[in-house]
Image: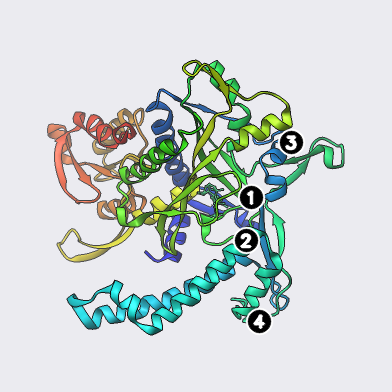
Amino acid sequence: MDFKKLISHCKEYGFIFQSSEIYDGLAAVYDYGPLGTELKNNIKQYWWKSMTQMHQNIVGIDAAIFMHPKTWKASGHVDAFNDPLIDNKDSKKRYRADQLIEAYAEKIEAKIKKDVDKAAKRFGDSFDEQQFRTTNQRIIDRQVKIDYAINTMNDFLAKEDMVGLKNLIEELEIACPESGSRNWTDVRQFNLMFSTQLGNIAGEESKLYLRPETAQGIFVNFLNVQKSSRQKIPFGIAQIGKAFRNEIVARQFIFRMREFEQMEMQFFVRPGEELKYYDYWKSTRMDWHKSLGTPSDHLRFHDHENLAHYANAAVDIEYQYPFGFRELEGIHSRTDFDLSKHEELSKKKLQYFDPELNENYVPYVVETSIGADRMFLAQISEALQEETVPDAKGNDSTRVVMKFNPAIAPVKAAVLPLLKNHEGLVNAATDLFDTMKTRFQCQYDEKDAIGRRYRRQDAIGTPYSITVDHQTLEDNTVTIRERDSLNQERIHKEEVPDMVGAATNINKLL
Ligand code: ATP
């Protein structure tokens, strides 16, 4: 589905609105509407249950957004949570230097892909893509350009060489996508944390940050949680909550926001065992994504080229968004970096006594970190489809449908009386609606012809629509229509709540 259509569908049906829209919006901040909130809550609930309910050794917390300012000194965010920023002097547009270089590489990659597709068409079944890519001179030359740009960039990023990055942008003759101008400022580091002031005291002492990740709330509570919940290593702490980053360039809808929500789990292990658990979480998390029905070829692992200062292994799970494969979730082996740093700055021991080894140590940590909003965007992108189906008369018609996994669909069932001015039908439908609403999200809809009401439910991804008609008044049966197959079946109305409840229950995914 076209990305622009997806964005307007989200607005039209109340999934996502731009923040403060009446004031022309606030860049990279979004509000969730009624259906968006339901969907996001379901996604969060599935994640939460998969972590805490399914693992005896994972417990959850809900830490405050504000933390002692030393937290961010210890975590490295004050000194190193920077992005390389560059401005174009003519268009006055601001960019991330690394993203400009990546876009340059992606453009060349697109040209390669065009050549490959052309050749594939020409050679048909006998086409060997690998051979073509390694022998076609034009493709080889282009690949050299890509590798040079990306490798040199990674080198400069690792060395924090801002002059090098600027020179590279000039050398590659990268122009401002807006104006075409190559009149660039120097590249400088820009810290992504938002800061605010505590009370009315001015100065560095009282400077507070809005947390840029939820993980630190877990680290500083490590011993509180371990002792109060009597956990033994290995064990994990899960948390869902808001995080804030002053992203330089915010693009692509809710993919990169300044205020977003993370679902993070830190798993504490014996030093030396971290890579075993890293592998475990890598495959467990990939399985979680597939359990929702996301096809394997829309997901992939991407190993980090530049390991963060705290990590000894790191991989992203990428999803194929409408604008290409991008990071959806990160799995990081963070060593004992965070806990050791907090020990150092707080001068409090953050060690675990291991009764089996009879020794104290600072545990190692494997983290899984996923953006709730990026997960939402992935599920919306996956679900929204336009397809041709037969209408009531058997003719081809187009429908827009959201094929959510029923367990996360915002509304589970719709109850539709065939006629709105018929007291018997309306009463029977209202009764059915009232028995169902205590169990799951339902809608009652009596407006317009039944076909239009079906289409409205398709457009918001409701898995089941139940029609109450004249026969219902005679034999208590109703028609239940399934969203994807369009199958319609008559069943006794008393069977409906259990049937829909079972088919849409989130626990089914666990
Ligand atoms: P990116 O490279 O895309 O900026 P990151 O590597 O900085 O992401 P992490 O610090 O690993 O991201 O954060 C963990 C997860 O939080 C990401 O996988 C992503 O799903 C989510 N996330 C990070 N930044 C944002 C943002 N600005 N808007 C929405 N979600 C985000």
Q: Give yes or no for contact between labels 3 and 1 (Cβ–Cβ under 8 Å).
A: no
Q: How far apart are marks 3 and 4 (CA)?
A: 42 Å
- In the displayed structure, 391 sits above or below 354; it is below
User: Which comes sooner in the sequence, label 4 or label 2?
Assistant: 2
Which numbered disc covers residue 70? 3
- Please tell me in which quadrant of the rendered image residue 74 appears: top right
Residue 139 appearing in the image:
yes
In front: 394, or 375? 375
Q: Residue 2 appears in which quarter of the rendering?
A: bottom left
Name the N-terminal-most of marks 1 and 2.
2
Please determine whether, in this image, residue 440 is positioned above or below residue 323: above
Q: Which element type, helix, strand or loop, lies under badge 4?
A: loop
The mark found on residue 181 in the picture is 4
Residues at marks 2 and 3 touching, judged by CB atoms closer than 8 Å: no
Q: Residue 14 carries which label?
A: none
Crowding at dot 1, Cα within 10 Å, few <14 / some 14-19 / many 20+, comes out as some
Q: Where is residue 475, by image quadrant?
A: top left
Amino acid found under the numbered disc labelled 1: Arg
Circles 3 and 4, Cβ within 8 Å, touching? The answer is no
Mark 1 Cβ inside 8 Å of ligand 1: yes
**Residue 402 location, x and y as percent?**
33, 53
- Is there a contact, CB below 8 Å, between mark 1 and mark 2? no
User: Label 4: few (<14), some or many (≥20) within 10 Å?
Assistant: some
* Mark 3 secondary-structure assignment: helix
Ranked by sequence position, the earlier of labels 3 and 4 is 3
- Residue at 51% from the left image edge and 38% from the top image edge: 264
Residue with the mark numbered 2:
157
- Apparent side of residue 209 relative to residue 274 in the rendered image (left or right): right
Q: Distance between the residues labelled 1 and 4?
A: 28 Å
CB atoms of marks 1 and 4 within 8 Å: no
The residue labelled by disc 1 is: 245
Q: Earlier in the sequence, mark 1 or mark 4?
A: 4
